[in-house]
Image (cartoon, grey):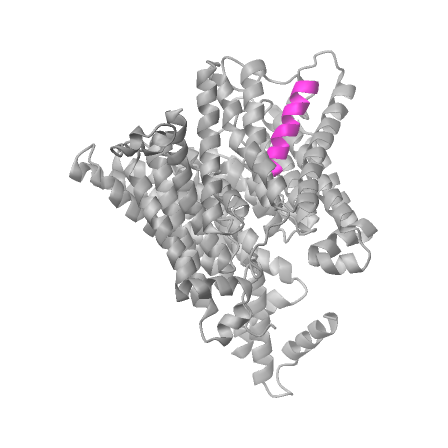
């Protein structure tokens, strides 16, 4: 009896506690979204299936000529790449206790810079253009991030406020520049960048299906491994984490806090810049003036859901991207406004933010259970608690 | 010149009421980045009420605006409970909670606006069309040279906001509740020892903050935008937070900061019109308030003194 009741708390306090919290958040999100869909009279299972179909994970009933499930799947992966990168950008700053809300702006600025500098430069060969795009993204994003870090430690400006301001400035400024110099009169967006500079190979035929090959996905997975390595094995990573835990404490241990803030914000900006070029020179190939990419905000939910672990965020990005990328198909086949994708992401974010509270409650429950039992009873619970206690100091 | 003052004031006052909302929450020790979301959701409820009631009263009725303001305050207050729940009950990180709420609010209002529109009119439009509120000029005062523009072509809600701001100042600085609220942000343990409930005071502060932000949001929808659409999320809430930071968490200086923002914005726009620049240059002038905010923050942030306990969940057992 008692054992069964403690299943959930145990899941949230043991070794895979973070995973347990994430899974629980996803389950709660499914429940809430399901209830929401039921109240507006739609079948949640249908909606879920068409979300997955829209991403090419489940086959649709019929496909147009020259396209197939693989086409959708590759489109999905093409969208996944900037999502993973953006969430890595958030994580890198978040580990230092900084909230980089400016990922959207950093993405937009670096995407714009790379489009103008490289994408419109017709003379470049493929082997020169693609690295140049990546480099521009890294540099522009990194510099923007460093600016935020500088404002933070030199002038004590909260990074959330400064990044938001910078977001709007970038959005209006690039909007103005696109509208006055680079606008395509037909689409009202910026002109399409050259295929040499694009990070996605288009119209590759695989088994009779037209596919896109997202090269940026390779960069994204590499970046995830590198960020993971940074925080697990390097001194810098340790210092960043120490600053994030307690700024004053790390100052006393001799860590140069201001430098660490600059570096982590710069790294975060640089990765956001990569996400920007992956999005604007891979996924969309043009820029809508005066609009910030939603990925910048979705990345926050991805990072929180992935418990700000670099590898975990790849899986979290899969979950969130399914809703964002599948929204269009779901909207046309089930008939629910496609804004529900953002709503679902928002709900997920809400539950992920409560993760610490879930863990705290679970620990309390375990403690109470252990206290109320006689010494001989239920050794696993007591053992688990003892092991946890031993880890703590 | 008059137009600069008129537009400046009508931008500054909604900003002010949002800034005061943030101030209440932060003074009680709950960091509030969620104003942006509060004002959007508040405006959504106000606009929804206005859209539902318009067939009953007939188009062009001004009474509906007051109803919309009430509903916006109520809606903002209800929505702010999520922030309260996360920050006070669930002890979540308050900055994360604010960001979460802002993201959630954009999605919520976008989804339910199109859902409500398709239920009411059958077309899934993402905006509620509102009338722009009627304007009036204060007799005599509007003829004062130089500052007469402040009293010309005013919106009725400007008076409401001004009165409300004064009441809020009184509540914060001259009542027992206000004193306790400020103490909650500085030393919650002392408030607890004095026998008041920190949790309850913080809840009240967050709900007040939501209600005031909602009023600010619906006023923007009725004046500047003339509709409710996703364009309500233009960063007004963040501007309000910046104004509060310049004001060093005090209502008086915050008012001046808001006036400054309003005048900078309308001044930039009038300058653009006066210089007869092509319309694409308005984008450059629209970014003026944001650049000014950053610059001013650089000068003012250094010697700021935020409430000591802001951002920390209340823990009774802590010393």
**Residue B252 percent coordinates (x, y):** 45, 48
In what quadrant of the picture does the C terminus of chain A appear?
A: bottom right
Task: Name the residue: 66% across, 75% down.
Answer: A385
Name the quadrant containing residue B40. Answer: top left
Tally the numbered discs.
0
Front residue of B134/A273: it is B134
**Residue B85 percent coordinates (x, y):** 46, 60
Magenta region's main secondary structure? Answer: helix
**Residue B200 percent coordinates (x, y):** 43, 67
Front residue of A29/B113: it is B113
Magenta-drawn segment: A102-118
Name the quadrant containing residue A20. Answer: bottom right
Q: Is residue B243 magenta?
A: no
- Considering every residue shown, the one lying at the far front of the view is B145
Query: Is any atom of residue A344 visible in this view?
Result: no
Judge from the rendering whether residue B122 lies leftward or rightward of residue A300; answer left or right: left
Name the quadrant containing residue B14. Answer: top left
Q: Is residue A108 magenta?
A: yes
Judge from the rendering whether residue A72 lies leftward or rightward of residue A244; answer left or right: left
Query: Is B191 located above or below residue B58 in the figure?
Result: below
């Amino acid at each position: 009896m008692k054992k069964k009741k403690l299943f959930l708390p145990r899941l949230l306090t043991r070794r895979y506690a973070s995973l347990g919290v994430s899974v629980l958040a996803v389950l709660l999100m499914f429940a809430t979204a399901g209830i929401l869909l039921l109240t507006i009279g739609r079948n949640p299972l249908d909606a879920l299936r068409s979300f997955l179909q829209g991403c090419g994970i489940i086959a649709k009933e019929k496909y147009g000529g020259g396209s197939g499930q693989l086409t959708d799947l590759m489109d999905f992966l093409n969208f996944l790449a900037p999502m993973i990168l953006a969430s890595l950008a958030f994580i890198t700053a978040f580990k230092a206790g900084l909230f980089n809300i400016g990922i959207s702006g950093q993405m937009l600025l670096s995407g714009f810079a790379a489009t103008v500098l490289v994408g419109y430069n017709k003379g470049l060969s493929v082997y020169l253009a693609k690295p140049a795009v990546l480099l521009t993204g890294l540099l522009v994003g990194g510099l923007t991030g460093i600016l935020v870090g500088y404002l933070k430690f030199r002038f004590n400006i909260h990074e959330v406020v400064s990044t938001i301001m910078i977001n709007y400035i970038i959005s209006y400024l690039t909007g103005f520049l696109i509208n006055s110099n680079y606008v395509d009169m037909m689409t009202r967006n910026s002109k399409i960048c050259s295929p040499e500079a694009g990070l996605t190979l288009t119209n590759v035929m695989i088994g009779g299906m037209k596919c896109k090959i997202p090269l940026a996905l390779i960069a994204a997975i590499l970046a995830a491994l590198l960020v993971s390595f940074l925080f697990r094995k390097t001194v810098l990573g340790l210092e960043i984490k120490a600053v994030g835990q307690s700024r004053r404490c790390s100052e006393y241990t001799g860590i140069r806090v201001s430098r660490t803030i600059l570096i982590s914000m710069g790294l975060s900006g640089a990765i956001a810049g990569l996400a920007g070029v992956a999005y604007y020179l891979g996924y969309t190939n043009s820029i809508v003036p005066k609009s910030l990419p939603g990925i910048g905000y979705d990345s926050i939910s991805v990072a929180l859901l992935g418990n700000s672990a670099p590898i975990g965020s790849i899986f979290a990005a899969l979950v969130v991207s399914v809703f964002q990328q599948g929204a269009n198909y779901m909207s046309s086949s089930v008939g629910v406004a496609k804004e529900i994708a953002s709503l679902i992401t928002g709900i997920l974010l809400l539950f992920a933010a409560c993760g610490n509270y879930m863990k705290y409650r679970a620990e309390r429950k375990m403690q109470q259970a252990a206290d109320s039992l006689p010494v001989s009873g239920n050794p696993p619970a007591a053992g688990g608690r003892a092991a946890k206690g031993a880890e703590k100091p | 010149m008059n137009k600069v003052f008129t537009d400046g004031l009508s931008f500054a006052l909604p900003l002010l009421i949002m800034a005061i909302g943030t101030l209440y929450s932060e003074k009680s020790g709950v960091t509030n980045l969620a104003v942006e979301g509060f004002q959007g959701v508040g405006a959504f409820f106000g606009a929804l009420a206005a859209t539902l009631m318009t067939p009953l009263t007939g188009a062009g009725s001004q009474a509906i605006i007051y109803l919309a303001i009430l509903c916006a305050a109520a809606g903002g207050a209800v929505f702010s409970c999520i922030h309260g729940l996360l920050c006070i009950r669930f002890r979540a990180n308050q900055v994360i909670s604010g960001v979460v709420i802002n993201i959630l609010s954009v999605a919520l209002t976008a989804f339910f606006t199109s859902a409500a529109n398709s239920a009411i009119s059958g077309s899934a439009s993402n905006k509620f069309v509102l009338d722009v509120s009627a304007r009036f000029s204060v007799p005599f005062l509007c003829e004062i040279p130089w500052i007469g523009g402040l009293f010309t072509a005013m919106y009725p809600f400007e008076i409401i906001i001004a009165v409300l701001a004064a009441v809020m100042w009184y509540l914060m600085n001259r009542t027992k509740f206000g004193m306790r609220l400020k103490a909650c942000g500085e030393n919650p343990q002392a408030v607890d020892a004095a026998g008041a409930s920190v949790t309850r005071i913080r809840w009240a502060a967050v709900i007040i903050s939501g209600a005031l932000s909602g009023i600010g949001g619906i006023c923007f929808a009725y004046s500047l935008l003339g509709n409710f659409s996703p364009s309500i999320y233009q960063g007004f809430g963040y501007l309000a937070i910046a104004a509060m930071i310049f004001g060093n968490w005090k209502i008086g200086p915050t008012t001046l900061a808001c006036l400054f923002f309003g005048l900078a914005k309308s001044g930039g726009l009038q300058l653009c019109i006066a210089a007869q620049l092509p319309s694409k240059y308005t984008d450059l002038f629209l970014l003026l308030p944001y650049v000014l905010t950053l610059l001013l923050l650089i000068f003012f942030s250094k010697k700021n003194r935020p409430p000591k306990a802001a951002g920390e969940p209340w823990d009774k057992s802590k010393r």
